[in-house]
Amino acid sequence: MKENRRSFFKWSLALGAIGLTAPAKAMNNLGSLGKVTRKPIIISTWQHGMDANKKAWEVLGNKGSALDAVEQGAREVESQVENKSVGIGGLPDELGKVTLDACIMDHNHKCGSVAFLQDIEHPISVARKVMEDTPHVMLVGEGAQKFALEKGFEKKNLLSKSSKEDYKKWKASQERKKPEVNHENHDTIGLLAMDEAGNISGACTTSGWAYKLHGRVGDSPIIGAGLYVDNEIGGAVATGLGEAVIRVSGSHLVVELMRQGKSPQEACQLAVERIIAKHDDLTGLQVGFLALNKKGEVGAYSVYNGFNYGLKSKDQDELIDAPFNRKW
């Protein structure tokens, strides 16, 4: 098998040298493969990932663990009242209730998750408590809230004045709001970090689809969909329409593609193409993946343009636009 792979790579290099390349359609929007970044490193989805990275770096920059870093980064965004897609201030469901989902996963393959959680500002920290203090992976609804209160979390009204006004306008219009395929489709924050020891952890947190059916849960709290980490290979997070991500076990798919030898960039693109192939109607269907492997290579790709991510390391601190399959 190794000899066959060597022969394939030699053959590929030879074709490249004489100008024979893959079909343009196959290479369309591939983007440049992520360069190797020195550890520690933190990457986070969307522009608010820059704030998350800054907070996470307070941990990573002091030789802290990747697990602590992603939790602190997620908490930073969960507390931003002006952010209407994560934590306090998140847009509510059809009944005017803010319901939160989150999960976290460490380098030892331990994970915790909460879904349909109400009145608790930091679901990511509750998810970590589920991981560390129970034999379970996921708690939901009233049970998740009861557990959080028992662990010392305080109840808080999560519906901000601004989000309440938006809800009233939606309610008056009586129109079901569908996901908008544009640069404002910031429905989640997903984080991946690798610390000085080379260990990878990840986190994902969201208030979900605005004005969703009461009780709806997306991909964000589901291990293997919104987040997956395998410390031997790397990690991946997803953002966008959760239903589409769940259908292909998106983040797990990305990590398994990396296990097969794909770069993070290639793996993210292939996962997006899998989603596109499985859906007849792509209207409103924005999905993006972000991945990090053990080498420190980063990749990202989305169905439509507009997806970006923040990257912070010892010598980088930037917001990067992800390659995409099609324009909106």
Image: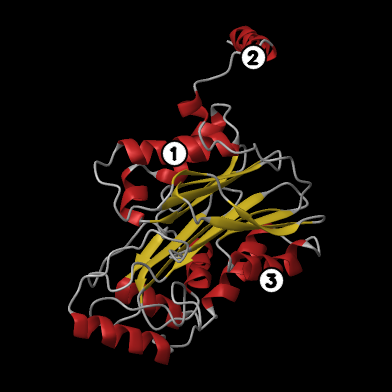
Could you classify mark 3 by the number of other residues whose Cα lies within 10 Å: few (under 14), some (14-19), or many (20 or more)? Answer: many
The nearer-to-camera label among 2 and 1 is 2
Picture disc at residue 19: 2
Residue drawn at point x = 26 percent, y = 69 percent: 177
Quote the CA–CA distance across marks 1 and 3: 30 Å
Q: Secondary structure at mark 1?
A: helix
Q: Mark 2 belongs to which amino acid?
A: Gly
Residue 257: image location, x then y, percent: 50, 32
Quote the CA–CA distance across marks 3 and 2: 46 Å
Q: Nearer the viewer, residue 217 or 181?
A: 181
Residue 323: image location, x then y, percent: 54, 45
Looking at the image, tell me whether mark 1 or mark 3 is earlier in sequence order.
3
- Pointer 1 residue: 271
Q: Residue furthest left?
A: 174
Q: Secondary structure at mark 2?
A: loop
Could you classify mark 2 by the number of other residues whose Cα lies within 10 Å: few (under 14), some (14-19), or many (20 or more)? Answer: few
- Horizontally, is 55 left or right of 111 in the view? right
Instruction: Answer with the quarter of the image where residue 1 lies.
Output: top right
Let me know if residue 157 appears in the view.
no
Mark 3 and mark 2 residues within 8 Å of each other at the beta carbon: no
Instruction: Answer with the quarter of the image where residue 319 lies.
Output: bottom right
Could you classify mark 1 by the number of other residues whose Cα lies within 10 Å: few (under 14), some (14-19), or many (20 or more)? Answer: many
Looking at the image, tell me whether mark 2 or mark 1 is earlier in sequence order.
2
- Horizontally, is 89 left or right of 10 in the view? left
Picture disc at residue 55: 3
Residue drawn at point x = 38 percent, y = 84 percent: 163
Mark 1 and mark 3 residues within 8 Å of each other at the beta carbon: no
Let me know if residue 238 appears in the view.
yes
Q: Secondary structure at mark 3?
A: helix
